[in-house]
Amino acid sequence: MKIAIITVIFCMVFCLVCGASDTELNVIESGICTGVVDHAAVGVDEVFGRGVEKLYCFTRVLSPYLEGKEQYIEHVWYYQGTERARIHLPVKSSSWGTYSSKIIQPFEVGDWHVDVLDPLGETIRVFQFFIKE
């Protein structure tokens, strides 16, 4: 009887741990940048000039990767508090770098931010940046 109870408890704990890790994503490298070269962000900053035409949000995540199970993140771009773009990005291995980009119009000066969301829609990172005159 004791062995059966211990086995059930072990299985419950194992299932809880595995279930929690299926969607756990850890951002290990990221930022708003002017380009992505050789799987790395270049020109990372928090303030950009009005003349910038395009910016990238680069995110490298560590995650438990289960073969055949889709894992993803989303980049949600906001300008002055209004959502401007939502990009669904697959995570295809346990260490995965990905990025989204946004064309910046000349009149879009001011406060921006990009929320990085996990598969459950929870915010795992926020990048704030500013486009100056």
Image (tube, rainbow, N blue to C red):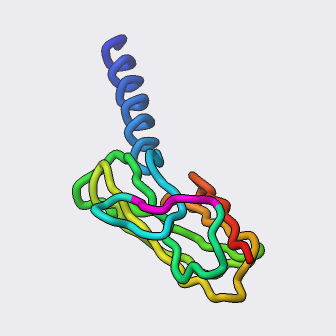
Residue 129 is drawn in which quadrant? bottom right
Outermost residue toward the top in this view: 2
The C terminus: image quadrant: bottom right
Q: Position of residue 54 (x, y in %)?
A: 52, 80
Q: Where is residue 112 in the image (x, y as percent from the top left)?
A: 69, 70
Rendered view: 30 above or below 102: above
Residue 21 among magenta residues: no
| Residue 117 visible in image | no
| Residue 124 visible in image | yes
For image coordinates 24% across by 61% down, the residue present is: 68
- In the rendered structure, the answer to whether residue 9 lies left or right of residue 92 reads right
The N terminus: image quadrant: top left
For image coordinates 27% across by 54% down, the residue present is: 93
Rendered view: 82 above or below 114: below
- In the rendered structure, the answer to whether residue 57 lies left or right of residue 50 reads left
For image coordinates 30% across by 49% down, the residue present is: 94
Judged by its main secondary structure, the magenta piece is loop
Observer-nearest of 32 and 67:
32
Outermost residue toward the left in this view: 67
Residue 109 is drawn in which quadrant? bottom right
Q: What stretch is highlighted in magenta?
A: 41-46
